Amino acid sequence: MATPVVHSLREQIREHILEGIVGGRWQPGERIVERRIATELSVSQTPVREALRELESLRLIESSPNKGVRVRELTATDLKESYPVRAGLEQVAAELAAPVLAEDVSALEPEVAALYEADRAGDGEAQVRHTVAFHREIVKAAGNAVLLHTWESLGIEVWTTLSIRWLSPEPRTHAEEHAEIVAAFRRRDPAIGELLKAHVLSCAPRI
C-alpha cells in the first residue's frame, strides 16, 4: 500500500494561493493580503509569508514596501521565457535517461494512457497534470538530483497552466506526441534528446 504524501503547512498554503492565481481569484495586478489568507486558513502569518516568498521566487507575484504583495502583470514573453531553459534541461535528461527507459518505460505509460483519456474528454487540467507528470518521470529517470531540482524549480506545472489559461491557445491533443516519445525511448533513438527538446519548444506560447 502506497504511503500518502504529507505536505508541509507552507506547501499547502502555497498550493492554495497558486490555485487562486491560476483559477482567477486573484487577477494580474491584484493585491494578495497576507493577513486575510492567514485568517481564512486559520494559520499564523509566518507560513503564509514563507509561501508567498516561494511564489515570488517563481516570479508569479511581486512585493514592494508601498504596494504590498501583488500578482505579477505577466506577459506572453514572461510565460515563454522558461521554455528554452526547460527544453535544454530535458534534452540532457532524455540523454541521461535513455539507457534506463530503453529497458523499462512503465513509468511513462500510465501518463500516456491518462492523456488519451484527457484528450477524449477535452479535460485541459488533466492534460496539464499528466503532461507534466510524464516529463517529470523522464527527468527522474536521468538519476541526477541537481537536474531534477533545477527542473522542478522552474514551476513547470504552474507556468504551463498559466500559458493555457491566460493566453488561450488553440485546443490540442497531447497523447499521440507523448506516445511517440515513449516509442523513441523503446527503439533507442540516438536523437532522443533533440526530439524531446523540439517537443518542449513546440509547446511554448506563440507571441
Image: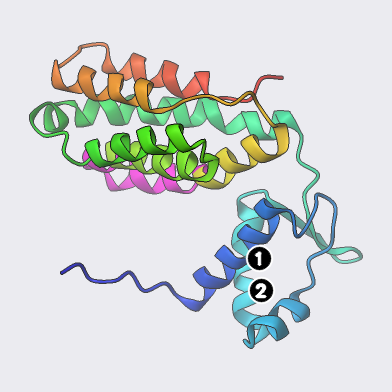
Q: Position of residue 118 (x, y in %)?
A: 43, 38
Residue drawn at (43%, 32%), measured in percent from left and top?
A: 120
* Horizontal relation, residue 13 to residue 197: left or right: right
Q: Position of residue 136 (x, y in %)?
A: 35, 42
The kind of residue on which mark 1 rests is Leu
Residue placed most toward the observer, 141 or 122: 122
* Horizontal relation, residue 80 to residue 7: left or right: right
Query: Mark 2 highlights which residue?
Result: 49
Whether residue 91 is visible here, answered yes or no, is yes
Q: Quadrant of residue 117?
A: top left
| Disc 2 element | helix
Residue drawn at (34%, 26%), measured in percent from left and top?
A: 178
Q: CA distance from mark 1 to mark 2?
A: 5 Å
Q: Quadrant of the image for the N terminus?
A: bottom left
Residue 3 is one of the magenta-drawn residues: no
Q: Residues within 10 Å of mark 1 (few under 14, many from 20)?
A: many
Residue 144 is one of the magenta-drawn residues: yes
Q: Position of residue 128 (x, y in %)?
A: 49, 40
Disc 1, disc 2: CB below 8 Å?
Answer: yes
Q: Position of residue 11 (x, y in %)?
A: 50, 69
The kind of residue on which mark 2 rests is Arg
Residue drawn at (66%, 73%), measured in percent from left and top?
A: 49
> Which SS type dominates the magenta stretch?
helix
* Horizontal relation, residue 38 to residue 130: left or right: right
* Horizontal relation, residue 151 to residue 51: left or right: left
Query: Mark 1 highlights which residue?
Result: 52
Residue drawn at (24%, 25%), measured in percent from left and top?
A: 182
Magenta extent:
139-156
